[in-house]
Amino acid sequence: MDVLIFLIAVVSFAVLVWGMAVAARRLLGVRFGFARLVVAGMTGLTVAEPLARSLTVGTPQDGWFILLATLCAQLVTVAFLVVTEVLLPSGSVTPIRWLRSWRSSMARTRRYLQISRILIRRGLGPYLRGRRRLDAASRARLAASIRQALEEGGVTFVKLGQVLSTRRDLLPAEFIDELSALRDQAAPIPWPEIAGRLEAEFGVPLGELFAEIDEQPLAAASVAQVHTARLLSGAEVVVKVQRPGIHAVVERDLDIVRRLARTLETRTSWGRSTGALSLAEGFAQAVREELDFRIEARNMTAVAAASADPGVVYPVPCEGLCTSRVLVMNRLHGVPMSKAGPVAAARGADPSALASILLRCILRQVMLGGVFHADPHPGNVLLLPDGRLGLLDFGSVGRIDSALRSALQRLLLAIDRADPTALTDALLDLVPRPENADPARLERSLGQFMARHLAAGMTPEAQMFTDLFRIVAEYGLAIPPEIAAVFRALGTLEGGLADLAPGFDMIGAARGFATTYLAEQATPEAIRGTLTEELVTVLPIIRRLPRRLDRIAGALEQGRLSVSVRLLADERDRQHITGLLHQVLLTILGATAGVMAVLLLGTDGGPQVTPKVSLYELLGYHLLVVSVFLVLRVLIRIFRSNS
């Protein structure tokens, strides 16, 4: 019997809790999670009994006070849901997500403390807090400290330093020189781990994949390790295997990079001027793509198709042997570009001609194909035995659409012709135009820029791009990430071309490419093709135009010309307006009920329900509860829409 009574009590309590929770959800008109509803119902039911006991006075009119106590308990349930929605919006915290978040947060905190200790040990703390200013005397010392801190930080920070080493438009020469010394090297992974990963990735023994594979790595970087191998068909290949556990390390480090970038942008003027946070987000996206080798395999094919240059060779991924963590491709034998100059000269080849081929290849990828190698540093370019060049490592690839390519082409042509007006138009088409842009003043600044760098008899230098970026920053123009990737690739290429052919005029060669491209676009065949494409697009419109003009003229002649405009034709617009009207109506009703409640509570006299409470006061209490209900319903709609 006792067990039965206990079960009845438990079931009754559960029914009451769930009833209050469901009533609160219906009153608010929005959905909540099961756990939140149960806690809200228990909270309301907990206060219901004390409220009822305090309000009842043992008179025949106790029913009104029991109703008031019930409404107040329901009000507590509703208020609990609204307050928790403000503090913890629905969906932001669940038990499983909270546990995962807690574990990742603890790991991230440990890594964050480790990075913080590195920064403090290298003396970088005051610069992060914005308490020291950079001057010429401290730049070299600060640049060395930053390089050492990045090396200690590991793979993500080394790659960040390598990316920053190409941004001559953002960093002084001292920082570029130090960051250029960063090398993405790491201790080799033991062969048993590599073999185990390969067999686990493909699900077969190594003997069924390769005729032979060298256990000694050809190269070992912080992200992956490369081994030479021979397929069963006899083809020579290289096998790129990702390091175990690299994803978790990189994700934690990217979060730290983003936090540091936000700190720099908030607390330092140079962080704000360089857009540190947007740079960090672009870097994070590039690193995540680099960790998926399937993307790299697709990039190889896309870049090769975008630049069909007979002087440049690309590796070909082996179909069926490429996964997100393993990449198998044919092997290219050659000498790195940093050592290719003397080798080319010894073979009787012209290093300057090779530099021109490589520059033309990258420019064709950018200007014509729209898919380009974004990291052509000297280690990613080989001089092959047959005199051609080979491009490696397509983990970082940039993409620009046709509109940006067209603007970039006009920009290059304007620089070649030293035309400030055309350069201004191309630059404003290339970047988002700010509301307070002053094209005339910008054109004068660009004219002075061209007079300094592109006057007759002057040899352009790479410094001209730095000055161009300074003008862009001065006028508040934001370079799109795609275009920043283009200039980063060209900046990286500049150092490699200097190693391959010292004294090579990269700017002059680029101007020559612009002239050649313009000549290609001006041939009769190219013009005929362009006109044909435009005519095919416009011809259907031209064919329908006379009939439409005749209809308009006839309607105008007969006085029947009218314009039909359908307001709120979209269902979403109607729903939005209806929702706003509902909120306004609920606000008015809540305010009205509140005002009436205050008036009734302040009115003396009237029939007495109890010796201390009049009928006016009792009605005022009920209206006050109704007013709070309506206001909370409006608030929950606002908070839910904002979240």
Image (cartoon, helix red, strand yellow):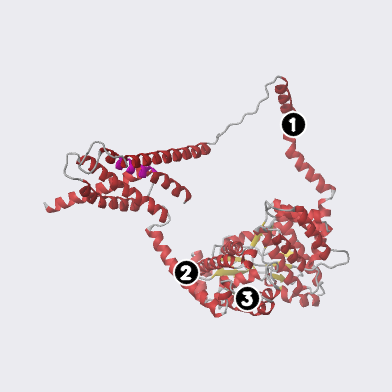
Q: Earlier in the sequence, mark 2 or mark 3?
A: 2
Residue nearest the viewer, comparing 170 with 377: 170
Residue 543's mark? Answer: 1
| Residue 323 visible (yes or no) | yes
Q: Earlier in the sequence, mark 2 or mark 1?
A: 2
**Alpha-carbon neighbours of circle 1 within 10 Å: few (<14), some, or many (≥20)?**
few
Give the amino acid at mark 1.
Arg
Q: Earlier in the sequence, mark 1 or mark 3?
A: 3
Between the residue at mark 1 and the residue at mark 3, the CA separation in whole angstroms equals 63 Å
Give the amino acid at mark 3.
Arg
388 displayed left or right of 640: right
Between the residue at mark 2 and the residue at mark 1, the CA separation in whole angstroms equals 64 Å
**Alpha-carbon neighbours of circle 3 within 10 Å: few (<14), some, or many (≥20)?**
some
Q: Give the residue at mark 3.
A: 183
Quarter of image, res 486: bottom right
Residue 34's mark? Answer: none
Q: Which residues are magenta?
A: 620-630
444 displayed left or right of 132: right
**Alpha-carbon neighbours of circle 2 within 10 Å: few (<14), some, or many (≥20)?**
some
Residue 108's mark? Answer: 2
393 displayed left or right of 592: right
Q: In the rendering, at what x and y percent does residue 290 appear?
A: 59, 64
Label 3: which secondary element: loop
Residue farthest to the top?
Answer: 558
Helix, strand or loop: magenta stretch: helix
227 displayed left or right of 38: right
